[in-house]
Amino acid sequence: MEFADLGLSPDTLKAVTDAGYLTPTPIQAQAIPVVLMGRDVLGVAQTGTGKTAAFTVPMIDILADGRSKARMPRSLILAPTRELAAQISESFVKYGKYHPLSMALLIGGESFTDQEKALDRGVDVLIATPGRLLDLYERGRILLNDAKILVIDEADRMLDMGFIPDVERIVGLLPKMRQTLFFSATMDKEIRKLADQFLMNPKEIAVTAAATAAKTIEQGMVTVKTLDKREALRRLLRGKGVNNAFIFCNRKKDVDILFKSLEKHGFNVVGLHGDMPQSKRNEMLAKFKAGEAELLVCSDVAARGLDISDVSHVINFDVPVNAEDYIHRIGRTGRAGKTGHAYTIATPSDTRLLAAVEKMLKGPIPPLDIPELAELTVSADASDEGARDGGRGKRGRPERGRPERGRGRGRERGPDRERPAKTEEVPAPVQAAEPEAVQPIVIAEAPEPLQETVVENLDEVRERKGRDRERGRGRQDRNSDARGAEDRARKTRRNPHGIAEMDIADNVLAFGGFTPAFLLVDPYGGKGAPPMRAVEDDAELPDEETAPVETADAAPESEPADHAPEPPASSSAA
């Protein structure tokens, strides 16, 4: 079967022929006629089988008739990464060069102004990542009411990257009557649930079993200690005649570290990960595609959508955390029927991750037999030194049962030894504490007599401040004098009656910094208080105005009954 048998227009066939393609791949041969019929499609095929052309080529024919409106795209393609979105846009440019179709690319890291201008002119094909599309929608710069075709590419990657809530929101903004094309390299239960939610009576096309590697890829694996991973990579690159290669790491931090290490050892290498600015990412990809760099150290952001021909090797410096990512990584080589090589550098601590990959592949990864790696190769059951530090070329924390000798830099681990058995310690008998001797209470000596200080008048304080300003004292002196004057003025404002201030010792309990006024008034006029006398309950109290004030020298008129003198003795008794 050839492309001419799929029902495409002459202009589209001419563009495909100019690109050098005559025979469609299995996914293209089955999907293109169904898309031209207007049906929903659920396509499952491994990476590198031509899924992008399977939906771009028929979309060009469908959109050839019609006119776009400002801010209202006629079709929408969602991609999980910027690189995949850019790859799709290149396919539209290549296959649609004989059609007057407009296209806009909405990805992060690019100017909002340029993208808004493209939308204002009207676009037939809108290719976007979910985040940037929602940003422009919330700004009121785009409407999705006129989109008749929706394409969700790499749906499993959308799920892994957490884009599914955004995709569900975007689908809710599209018209109900539309054609939806759903493509993925893997298909699990969660992806199938999403397909049932978005698609309506789809035609399911699965050209190969889900999550299988291409037969044109030679796989191999070597197991080394974590501290030897970089050395094993360097020997592998020098010993296998690598023309160009993708080198995958699990973490963005490790991408930078490995990039600097390879560059230091004289390799022609570039780096790529998701935290880099878009301009830098484009620059690195351009160098690798042009052959200016032989090695591309990258994260899983480059595992999808990068269609670079003649890549001889893919090296997994880290075993992928998700088993499905292994298929996407090695799919960067062995494309279009060419032979490729995919090697994995594993450590004894990667046993669980390797088991998941081999379960997905339904078979073990064959060992890599390279003479240069013989002295570094270890068994999967060997102890893994340096596994705690992630293989960054430094010694990690000591493992259990392996004590270290000495301290500081350059310390070496001691020999393996068993940990001593724990012995139960018998607690010592608790003895009652002896009572502490009672300390005698020491009475503080009486404080010194209070000294009175005179508070200066507020007017004098103000005059002094004015004189100080006129004399031009330094700023520091003025501040200190003013601060002291303000403190004294504040005391004067709190003491309007001019009551003398007292200096009170720290160990004396008093009413405050001033003596209350009622304590300074003598109600008895200097004569002293009269002595206390008992008053009977029925006795009337004298009037305060007329009652004479008794002094201390006056004798009492009568004594209380309790102190009455004894009667004199009788004469007869005498």
Image (tube, grey):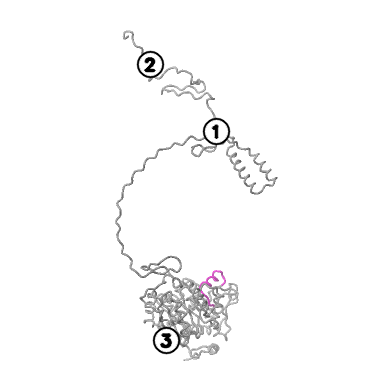
* Secondary structure under the numbered disc 3 in the rendered image: loop
The answer to whether mark 3 and mark 1 are in CB contact below 8 A is no
Give percent across and percent down for residue 382: 36, 75
The amino acid type, in three-letter code, at marker 2 is: Pro
Gap in angstroms between the C-alphas marked 3 and 1: 106 Å
Mark closer to the chain start, 3 or 1: 3
Residue corresponding to mark 2: 565
Q: Image quadrant of residue 370?
A: bottom left
Mark closer to the chain start, 2 or 1: 1
Residue corresponding to mark 3: 215
Q: Is residue 401 left or right of residue 393?
A: left
Magenta range is: 126-141
Q: Is residue 242 left or right of residue 120?
A: left
Q: Quadrant of the C terminus?
A: top left
Gap in angstroms between the C-alphas marked 3 and 2: 136 Å
The amino acid type, in three-letter code, at marker 1 is: Ala
The image shows residue 390, relative to residue 216, as above or below, that is: above
The image shows residue 569, relative to residue 105, as above or below, that is: above
* Residue plotted at (36% across, 12% down): 568
| Label 2 crowd bin: few (<14), some (14–19), many (20+), radius 10 Å | few
Give percent across and percent down for residue 29: 46, 87
Give percent across and percent down for residue 441: 41, 38
Most extreme residue toward the right is: 470
Q: Nearer the viewer, mark 3 or mark 2?
A: 2
| Label 1 crowd bin: few (<14), some (14–19), many (20+), radius 10 Å | few
Q: Nearer the viewer, mark 2 or mark 1?
A: 2
The amino acid type, in three-letter code, at marker 3 is: Lys
Residue corresponding to mark 1: 517
Q: Is residue 42 left or right of residue 424?
A: right
* Secondary structure under the numbered disc 1 in the rendered image: helix
Question: Which of the labelled discs sits on residue 66, or is there none?
Answer: none
